[in-house]
């Protein structure tokens, strides 16, 4: 009898475990429409990221062709960031008062127009003005994308979603940057921007036709002005923690990215023809790593993935910035590992950050967060332009110092992201204990 009862209990336990597993799989499985949303947001991010990143490999072409200094080139990078910061601040108060799809289409239209002006620019000042216009619109789009992602996907799958959306970063390296660099080298530096315009128009049409309205936040009515909404979002303590972490997260990429191709050519001894190869292999590896890291972060936790990525990035940034003449295969290997570390940090930090704002504040929080990110990035790019100097087309000087500054910022970021991890974890525990 006892054996029978034990057998029955074991069978029931197994049945319950199987039912729980099926329920978990049901909750974490994506519908056909959700797959479309992930894909279209990834393509959208591809155009935005490529528009920003394409300046980095073009630096080796633009500086001599437009006869500009490293400091002026850093201004081209930071101009986008500063204008994006301003527009993000202006838009943040209104971000939760409109359908997110409509806002996305409006700002994407401006982004396409600004990128077209970049492709038509014929001087440093014309390109600078075009970058400002592009930043005014493009800088807000990222915050709208993350607000949509947070609205449509639960926290338990958000790591995977962020991993797929951030594949845009990798695809821009595998396809966008090599193609853009090739077009710039063989035809004209204007061509990469015109290519982005063509892809963006196709993405715009798909969004307009197939994306459903994203307006759940409008059901939570709030009878306050846009300015009051902005101010209340700015002063809330948990949001301030997120904004502080964003300042430090933006430092690394914006300081190292602008001079990536120039450092590879002038200091590492690579040829202009080697640059697309480096970007291609690095992009392929991170394209594979992004979704895998997103899935791992959903299973083992966002915080452990962020810590691991930070440690790996710290080690490799310190090594990379000290290099002199280096064989191509070693540069590719270091870049692959470096960008896997960077991708780990990006996927995990964005997933954690998405858990901070309430539904009614998501648009405002993401808009402000984007503005702070762009402002911090612009200051970081300007600081990099002050630290790094080049004399008579020789090697870039003071690059190791740049690496040390980035490393210190990453160490401080660990502390800030741990606080965010605790906030999100506490919210999840409270939601589980609330009576249904």
Image (cartoon, grey):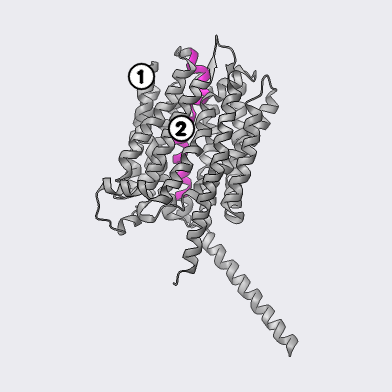
**What is the CA distance from the residue labelled 1 to the residue labelled 2?**
22 Å
Front label number (1 vs 2): 2
Percent x, y of residue 13: 65, 76
| Magenta region, residue range | 37-64
Outermost residue on the top side: it is 392
Which of these two is toward me, 333 or 253?
A: 253
Q: Could you say whether the residue bearing mark 1 is in a helix, strand or loop?
A: helix
Residue at the image point whose x is 62% and y is 36% from the top? 314
**Disc marking residue 377:** 2
Would you say residue 41 sits in the magenta stretch? yes
Asked whether the viewer can see residue 183, the reply is no
- Decide: marks 1, 2 in contact (CB < 8 A)? no
Q: Circle 2 sits in a helix, a strand or a loop, which is it?
A: helix
Main SS, magenta residues: helix
Judge by depth and name the residue closer to the eye, 108 or 421: 421
- Relative to 94, 373 lies left or right: right
Q: Position of residue 168 (x, y in %)?
A: 51, 39
Report whether residue 195 is seen. Answer: yes
Image-quadrant location for residue 15: bottom right
Q: Residue furthest right?
A: 3
Q: Residue at x 42, y 41 (%)?
A: 142
Q: Is residue 295 above or below residue 108?
A: below
Q: Which residue is mark 1?
A: 126
User: At 57% across and 50% down in the image, what residue appears?
Assistant: 303
How many numbered tags mark residues here? Answer: 2
The C terminus is located in which quarter? bottom left
- Whichever of labels 1 and 2 marks the residue nearer the N terminus, that label is 1
272 in magenta: no
Quadrant location of the N terminus?
bottom right
**In which quadrant of the rendered view does residue 195 lie?**
top left
Q: Which quadrant of the view contains residue 407? A: top right
As rendered, which of 413 and 125 lies closer to the eye? 413
């Amino acid at each position: 009898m006892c054996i029978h009862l034990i057998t029955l209990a074991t069978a029931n336990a197994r049945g319950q475990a199987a039912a729980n597993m099926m329920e978990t799989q049901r909750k974490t499985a994506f519908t056909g429409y959700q797959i479309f949303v992930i894909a279209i947001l990834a393509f959208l991010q591809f155009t935005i990221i490529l528009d920003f990143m394409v300046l980095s490999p073009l630096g080796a072409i633009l500086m001599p062709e437009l006869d500009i200094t490293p400091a002026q080139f850093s201004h081209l990078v930071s101009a986008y960031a500063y204008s994006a910061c301003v527009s993000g601040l202006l838009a943040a108060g209104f971000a939760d008062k409109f359908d997110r799809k409509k806002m996305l289409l409006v700002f994407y239209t401006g982004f396409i127009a600004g990128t077209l002006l970049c492709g038509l620019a014929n001087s440093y000042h014309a390109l600078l003005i075009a970058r400002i216009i592009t930043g005014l619109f493009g800088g807000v789009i990222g915050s709208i994308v993350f607000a949509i992602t947070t609205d449509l996907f639960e926290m338990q799958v958000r790591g995977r979603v962020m991993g797929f959306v951030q594949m845009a970063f990798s695809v821009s390296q595998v396809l966008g940057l090599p193609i853009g660099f090739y077009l710039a080298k063989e035809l004209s530096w204007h061509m990469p921007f015109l290519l982005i315009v063509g892809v963006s128009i196709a993405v715009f049409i798909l969004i307009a036709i197939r994306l459903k309205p994203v307006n759940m936040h409008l059901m939570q009515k709030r009878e306050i002005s846009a300015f009051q909404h902005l101010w209340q979002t700015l002063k809330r303590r948990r949001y301030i923690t997120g904004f502080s972490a964003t300042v430090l997260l933006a430092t690394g990429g914006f300081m190292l990215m602008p001079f990536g191709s120039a450092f590879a050519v002038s200091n590492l001894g690579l040829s202009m023809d080697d640059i697309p190869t480096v970007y291609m292999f690095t992009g392929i590896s991170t394209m594979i790593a992004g979704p895998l890291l997103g899935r791992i972060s959903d299973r083992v936790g966002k915080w452990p993935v962020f810590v691991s990525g930070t440690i790996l990035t710290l080690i490799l940034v310190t090594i990379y910035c000290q290099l002199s003449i280096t064989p191509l295969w070693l540069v590719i290997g270091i870049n692959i590992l470096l960008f896997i570390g960077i991708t780990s940090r990006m996927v995990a930090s964005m997933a954690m950050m998405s858990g901070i704002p309430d539904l009614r504040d998501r648009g405002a929080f993401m808009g402000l967060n984007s503005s702070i990110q762009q402002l911090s990035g612009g200051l970081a790019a300007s600081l990099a332009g002050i630290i790094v100097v080049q004399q008579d087309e020789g090697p870039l000087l003071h690059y190791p110092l740049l690496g040390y500054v980035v490393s210190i910022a990453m160490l401080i970021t660990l502390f800030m992201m741990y606080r965010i991890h605790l906030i999100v974890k506490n919210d999840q525990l409270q939601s589980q204990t609330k009576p249904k």
